[in-house]
Image (cartoon, helix red, strand yellow):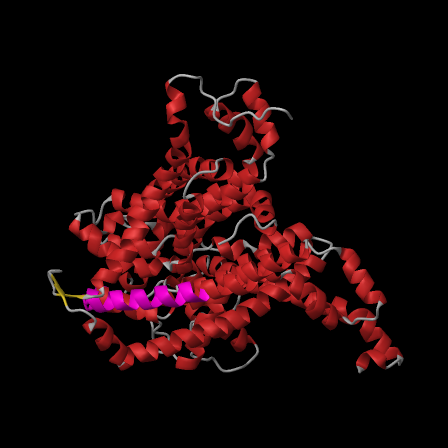
Amino acid sequence: MSHTTPMVEDGPTGADRLKPFVPYLLVLPGLLFVMGILGYAVVGGIILSLNETDMFMNKTFVGLKNYIDVFADPRFQDAMVRTLSFVVISIVLGIFMSMSFALVLYKVVRGRRFFRGLSLVPYFVSGIATAVMFRFIFTTSGGFVNTVLAQLGLPAQSWLGDPTLAFAVAIMANCWFMVPFASLILLGGLQTIDKDLYDAAAIDGANPIQIFFRITLPLIKPMLGVSLIWVSYISFSTFDIVLALTSGGPLKATELVSIYMYELAFQQLNFGQGAVLMVVLLVFNTVLSLIYIKIFVMGDRRHSEAGK
Amino acid sequence: MRVQESGPMALLFQRLGPKVLIWLTLTFLVIWTATPIIWAILSSFKDPLEIYESKSLLPEVWRLDAYRKVLSMPGFGTWLMNSIIVTVVATIVPLILAILAAYGFARYAFKFRHVLLLLYLIPRIIPRVSLIVPLNDLMSDLGLINTYSVLFITYIASAVPLATWILVGFFGSIPKEIEESATLDGANMWNRLRHVMLPMAWPGVVTAAVLCLREAWNEFSFVLALVNQTDMRTLPYQLYMLKDSMGIQDYAVYNAFTILTVLPLLLVYLLLERKVVDSIVSGAVKS
């Protein structure tokens, strides 16, 4: 290995002068889109949140007035509390389901490919279609659940008409949509674990629960982190599922921050206050993601590097 | 405690318990995953009045009326074409941009590499719906509302980071030596990318393509915020609008429409299922 070959070798003439720029030329076109659109939207949204808009979208700078108004608005406070409980319940239920699914997909021998393939199907169904399907599972007349109840001779329920039940159905639809991806990530984690570790633990007399908490869980920590980021990202940004399922009702029982943001900006044409809600969503989601990365991914990397 | 008992029942439980638990969970997984889709399919073949009566799970007569009604909706061809056009553009363009960027990140050491890589990552943790307010404001100022361009650029922008992150992983895992030997044989960068990197990272390219396809086909928030003319709607948008546009809801039509919007993407997934599932399980796809 006496000489190393440079990666770019386009001849000694003009191309040589371009060489240092090659990586930038490769990377920048994509970044232009990302920053031009998404980056602009973030910055533009923050600026918008400091302005008051009228019906013709004329903007006047008002400082933090929108923030003060929004935080004092009981409807926003309710939406915030609702979103937080929606996210917390979704994360707990979603991770529990993902972990259970990942464990059985790992354990099952016969039909393994089939079950895995099937488990990911909801990931490819759009949020709107998910919502419509769940509406027809739970709708009062003609819904799957009430049809089954009728066959069993039980009374029908108004699932989407009752505030608590509708909230529960929204969480179920959200889980249906987001769990498949999370469980395959966890399954990937399970497959990296050396089987000898399980055998050794079993010989030492550890029971399955001890094995799960002492061996499995610590070893799949990074993948657990990734699924947590996914699950909370999806739950925080849930919009299409709830909008098409309940439109925020009944009695605002499912009005999340994202739904209220849409209502403020696009129905009441109050873009300034709508932008405040955007900033709130952004801050919550970013902070949560950074916490997960710090705990699960970074912490683990440092740990494994120290171990080397 | 139960583990220490040694009666015959306890032994039986010890031996069968885990198996029963696995099969129960697996049964739940199948029912949970399949029920919403199967119910929508069954309902789409029923008579609208039959659905209201909730008498039986299976249709009395399997009717195709609902599908006929959907296909003969005046705008259906337009919405389908809109979805196809937007999806094709928002898959191919991000894929090309991502292949270039991922090659740059995976193979070159350069100033600001980490910062630029981070700029590609950050958008993945921004809730897309939160961007619709400023995007609507910007695109109204630019006069781009109700155009294909506005859908193209927003869809592309949100797909590029995803595809780039998948491909950086795949390109990075290809040993540098293989490329170096191609260089010695006189291959320039384009040839190396085309004849060495892409074939070797093919499962990654396919996965990235399928995931871009998925994002574009299913996208809703952007089209909702940036389009308001009926003939600019995509299928998911129209599916959402059906809720308001039908006076007395024809549930069979609603279900048939849902199935027709979901089916094309599911077929793509079925064809490429192996590569996609393997890529996700192997940890190559991280949201």
Question: In the rendered image, is residue A277 in sight?
Answer: yes
Q: Give the range drawn in magenta.
A: A266-288
The residue shown at (53%, 54%) is: A121
Is residue A277 found inside the magenta-colored segment of the image? Answer: yes
Q: Is B93 within the magenta? A: no
Q: Using the rendered view, name the quadrant where residue A163 is placed.
A: bottom left
Q: Residue at x 86, y 82 (%)?
A: B5
From this view, report whether residue A250 is shown above or below residue A263. below
Residue at (37% x, 33% y) in the render: A25
Residue at figure coordinates x 50%, y 35% from the top left: B107
What secondary structure do most residues of the magenta stretch adopt?
Answer: helix
Q: Left of A23 or right of it: where is A56?
A: left
Q: How many marks?
A: 0
Q: Which of B95 and A68 is in front in this view?
A: A68
Looking at the rendered image, the quarter that the N terminus of chain B falls into is bottom right
- State the image coordinates of residue B71 (x, y, percent, origin top left): 35, 48
